[in-house]
Image (cartoon, helix red, strand yellow):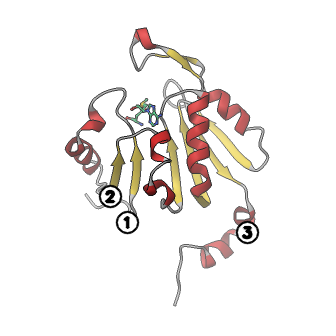
Amino acid sequence: MPRVAMWLIPLFDPSFVDDFWRDPERVKDHFLGFGIDNIRHFQMTTQQFVATTAYRTLGQIGLLFIDGRHTEEQASFDYEAFSKFVQPRGFVILHDSMIVRNDKVYGEENAYPMSVKNFVDKLKLDPSLQVVDFPFGHTGMTLLRKVDGEAGRNLHDWLDDGPNIKRA
Ligand SMILES: C[S@@+](CC[C@H](N)C(=O)[O-])C[C@H]1O[C@@H](n2cnc3c(N)ncnc32)[C@H](O)[C@@H]1O
């Protein structure tokens, strides 16, 4: 299967739910199954990762996918930590973002209210963002992009002269 991207995809997951992220070979094989051989997994929380040198040298992000602990507070932390690196015309996806209900992923006894939706509802009030919900699965997801100066440029100009395209 051909690889789908040339750049490095950083992933952050401390493996709090199961053992999957504790086994580098399993993680590597899982993504190789999708033709993806360019991930770098950090087995840590976002809170731990923001204190590392790797965080400070992240560079631009084309697609930010947020699917950590499903609380308003954690979604907000993840968004604040990474959205500043999202490149012009980049996207953010928040998973499990449309329903407030108990999350039992840590077991019945550790159920907690899933509240990413509350954070998304606040983002929807920001006129500098375009935010749309997709009612997929049981809990939905939300796609977001920043409407900044770059985003307002004529699309064709941007394609001809965009930040990632170098012409002779
Ligand atoms: C619903 S699972 C989704 C995992 C992965 N996106 C997937 O689809 O398999 C939520 C994940 O959030 C991780 N998590 C919990 N707290 C976190 C934190 N503070 N920072 C980063 N990840 C966290 C857990 O380890 C768990 O694997």
Image quadrant in which the N terminus is located: bottom left
**Mark 2: which amino acid?**
Asn
Instruction: Tell which circle, 3 or 1, labels the residue nearer the N-terminal end.
Output: 1
Q: Position of residue 127 (x, y in %)?
A: 79, 46
Q: Residue at x 62, y 60 (%)?
A: 89
Disc 3 or 2, which lies upstream in sequence? 2
**Above-or-below relation of 30 to 101:** below
| Residue positioned most to the top | 109
Q: Which residue is mark 3?
A: 153
| Residue 111's disc number | none
CB atoms at circles 1 and 2 under 8 Å apart?
Answer: yes
Please name whichever residue, 136 or 89, is drawn nearer the observer in this view of the structure: 89
Q: CA distance from mark 1 to mark 2?
A: 7 Å
Residue in view at x 66 percent, y 34 percent = 120
Distance from label 3 to label 1 (Cα)?
A: 26 Å
Q: Which residue is under mark 2?
A: 38
Q: Is mark 2 within 8 Å of ligand 1?
A: no
User: In the rendered structure, which amino acid carries the disc numbered 3?
Assistant: Arg
Q: Nearer the viewer, mark 3 or mark 1?
A: 1
First reached walking from the N terminus: tag 1 or tag 2: 1
Dot 3 beta carbon under 8 Å from ligand 1? no
Looking at the image, how many numbered discs can be counted on the residues? 3
Q: Is residue 116 above or below residue 42?
A: above
Nearer to us in this view, 133 or 81 = 81
**Above/below status of 71 relative to 144:** above
Q: Furthest-left residue in view?
A: 25
Q: Position of residue 16 (x, y in %)?
A: 37, 28
Residue drawn 63% across and 46% down? 144
Instruction: Report the side of 93 relative to 13 (left or right).
Output: right
